Image (cartoon, grey):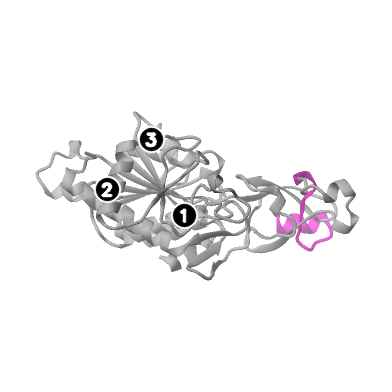
Amino acid sequence: MLETLRALIALPGVSGNEDKVREYIYNRINSYVDEIYIDALGSIISVKYGNYRTSNCNNETVPRIMLSAHMDEVGFIISAINDDGTLKFQTVGGIETGILPGKKILLGDNIPAIIGCKPIHLQEKEEFEKRAEFKNLYLDIGTTTKAESEKIAPIGTYGTFEQQLTILNGGKISGRALDDRVGCAILMTIIESGERFWNDVYICFTTMEEIGLRGSKTAAQSIKPDIAIVVEATTCADVPGVQAESVCTISGNGPALTLMDRSTICDKSLNNFIINAANSNGLKYQFKRLVAGGNDAASIQKAGEGCRVASISIPCRYIHSSQGVMDKEDMLICNELIMCTLRSFKSTGGKIC
């Protein structure tokens, strides 16, 4: 799974520009699923048929299960070009402005750029004492004229933080776009395991989550799932300077279940079903302690006639920045927890008891 994640992180996929990520995933999973298609918003919808199909069970009574992870990431888009060749840009998705000055990003087909601002030794006292204002940031690609820059990185060019996965000490990994390439890597691993479950399982890789949960909405409208599990990365602030009551999740304590976030109240019965699967298989887990963030569960829950949803998330430090940090074991446990949950449906006739 780690090598799959490494490959996914090496691909640019800012919201609305997920083409390379989509192509890689599609080509990897195509031969492992029974159906696969790409919808109008660019989400991949794949299906693994359930074992109930070979039984005498009435297929209309077996719930459809949807697994979902989003392919897109936060990033940048070129919005204007200055006469001196520097580029003005906008963020795509939520990025903390204070971390940006001096960061290396890659535009288009790996064109290096540096986020610049007024030099620190030329700043007035009031400028120095506050974070850089977004309106004063620009991209430097080494050119000196507008014409040069227009040829290299025209308006509309997307950009990402530098693309690499790094192995840290203590079982931790770091990289950009862990939100939510880690979810994609987990779902790909489930597909490539070759295992079939009792229910039909629709495994979706969605687009444009970071700008308004868009791809998951159209995917859910198409599938009409009865049950959905969103696999995500979530905020983790178990770091110095954060009071204990403000720590949402703890890295290394297992994947996190959501009770409620800013856009969803997860289904209590589905959460309990997942918890029973975890306890039965000796898998550790935790709960998100704060009502924070939101993800594709919100749009899936409200699609069509409604759907029972749950979120299983990997705690990620420094999320929506140039480099996130997460625990490798949390990722592996999350994969096993989803597998065990799917297996558990056989004993209940595919339903949540």
Q: Amino acid at mark 2?
A: Asn
SS at circle 2:
helix
Q: Amino acid at mark 1?
A: Arg
Instruction: Determine which residue is flagged by label 1.
Output: 22
- Disc 1 is placed on an element classified as helix
The CA span between labels 2 and 3 is 29 Å
Q: Amino acid at mark 3?
A: Gln
- In the drawing, does residue 322 fall left or right of residue 20? right
154 part of magenta stretch: yes
Q: Which residue is mark 3?
A: 221
Q: Which mark is residue 172?
A: none
Specify start and end residues of the magenta stretch as a single range: 134-156
In this view, 135 is above or below 26 = above
Quarter of the figure with the C terminus? top left
Splitting the image into 4 quarters, where does residue 195 fall? bottom left
* Nearer-N-terminus badge (2/1): 1
Q: Which residue is mark 2?
A: 276
Crowd class of label 2 (few under 14; some 14 to 19; many from 20; radius 10 Å)? some
Give percent across and percent down for residue 124.
90, 49
The answer to whether mark 2 and mark 1 are in CB contact below 8 A is: no
Residue 318 spot, x, y in % from top left: 59, 54
Q: Does dot 3 land on a helix, a strand or a loop?
A: helix
Q: Is residue 331 left or right of residue 194?
A: right
Q: Residues within 10 Å of mark 1 (few under 14, many from 20)?
A: many
The tag earlier along the polypeptide, 1 or 3, is: 1
Residue lying farthest to the left in this orientation: 56
